[in-house]
Image (spheres, helix red, strand yellow):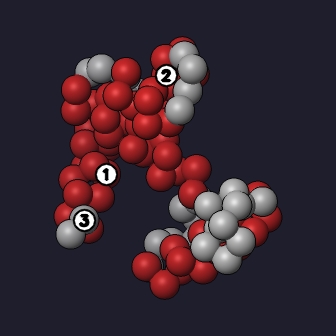
Amino acid sequence: MSEKTGIPYREKYYATDWREIAKKAGVPSEVWSMNSRSGAISEEDGATGNLEPARKFATHSSTKTTLRYARNDVLESNRSAALARQKLRP
């Protein structure tokens, strides 16, 4: 939801606002918003081996869709990325 309008973001405005926040947070320009979604799905799947919580998080109607976002084919790199993300959390 847009803080300015109270309604869901239109894609163009979401991307602009997301990039502004990401820049202030020090997120590299090659990282896109969609990467955070697939990263969270991969992190959940890698931690539990169960896609159901990730499916609910992503609001997918099918785990088949969620599986397309899970990037666990390179398990070790996913683990190091998950640990790095965890360190950034309060």
Q: Which residue is mark 3?
A: 89
Badge 3 amino acid: Arg
Residue 15 disc label: none
From what the image shows, is residue 21 above or below residue 89?
Answer: below
C-alpha gap between disc 3 and disc 1: 13 Å
Q: For numbered disc 1, what is the local secondary structure? A: helix
| Mark 3 neighbour class, 10 Å CA radius: few under 14, some 14 to 19, many 20 or more | few
Residue 67 disc label: 2
Q: Is residue 46 left or right of residue 30?
A: left
Residue 81 disc label: 1
Mark sitting earlier along the chain (1/2): 2
From what the image shows, is residue 85 above or below residue 40?
Answer: below
The answer to which image quadrant residue 18 occupies is bottom right
Mark 1 against mark 2, which lies toward the viewer?
2
Q: Is residue 74 left or right of residue 49?
A: right
Mark sitting earlier along the chain (3/2): 2
The residue at 62%/61% (across/down) is 1
Q: For numbered disc 3, what is the local secondary structure? A: loop
Badge 1 amino acid: Ala
Residue in the foreground of this view, choosing between 44 and 75: 44
Residue most extreme to the bottom:
24
Q: Position of residue 42 (x, y in %)?
A: 38, 36
The answer to which image quadrant residue 2 occupies is bottom right
For the question of whether residue 3 can be seen, the reply is yes
